[in-house]
Image: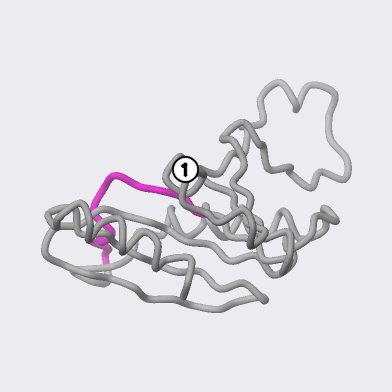
Amino acid sequence: RNFYKIELPSKEGWVSYPTEKHLKWPIARCSKRIHEIMPIMRADIVIDNKRTGARIIIDTKFTEIFGKSPYRERSLKSNYIYQIYCYLRTQEDTGEVGAHEAQGILLHPSVDEQVDEYIEMHGHKIRFITIDLSQSSDKVISDLRKILLT
């Protein structure tokens, strides 16, 4: 988050929110004490472009991007997909600029393997990206910058 807070060109309209920015559950009705036990929904990085209305929600993971499933030897981790999908869909009717078409990114570290794949569903693009941490720091920085440009 701090990388993008420093790197984003504010003159182009980019704003990175602090991690204290909670995403809201779209609860229509609830029981009396549910707010005491509902988990807080907080993405690692929320970036808005005030000029274009774009929103990007990035969730960073410090595990391998692939796991095993009963059906495949190598598969994206479904619980992470559910998480970013929930972040995107629950914000659609908040009235916040860019929330209805927000992009989600699951960002994982890797060594010797680059992944940059995506899906689009229900109006949201979700990207699955790795950053090879065995590269030089200049290359890591360059790759992090590119994420927002593509």
Q: Quadrant of residue 29?
A: top right
Taking the spot 59% from the left edge, 46% from the top edge, the residue there is 16
The residue shown at (51%, 44%) is 5
Q: Quadrant of residue 130?
A: bottom left
Lateral position of residue 11 relative to residue 104, left or right? right
Secondary structure of residue under mark 1? loop
Where does residue 73 sit, x and y in percent of width and height? Answer: 18, 69
Q: Amino acid at mark 1?
A: Arg
In the rendered structure, the answer to whether residue 87 lies left or right of residue 116 reads right
Q: Is residue 133 above or below residue 1?
A: below
The picture places residue 138, in percent across and down from the top left corner, at 22, 56
Mark 1 = which residue? 1
Residue sitting farthest toward the front: 11
User: Main structural element of the magenta stretch: helix, strand or loop?
Assistant: loop
Is 116 in the magenta?
no
Nearest the viewer among 24 and 75 is 24
Left or right of residue 50: residue 11: left
Q: How is the image coloured?
A: one colour
Q: Which residues are magenta?
A: 58-70
- Residue in view at x 50 percent, y 42 percent: 44
Viewer-side residue, 61 vs 147? 147
In the depicted structure, whether residue 137 falls above or below residue 127: above
Relative image position of residue 96 (x, y in whole percent): 80, 55
10 Å crowding of disc 1: few (<14), some (14-19), many (20+): some
Left or right: 12 as drawn, with respect to 126: right
Q: How many numbered dots are placed on residues in this image?
A: 1
Near-viewer residue (148 or 95): 148
* Image coords of residue 63 (percent x, y): 26, 48
- The residue depicted at 76 percent of the width and 60 percent of the height is 92
- Is residue 61 on the magenta stretch? yes
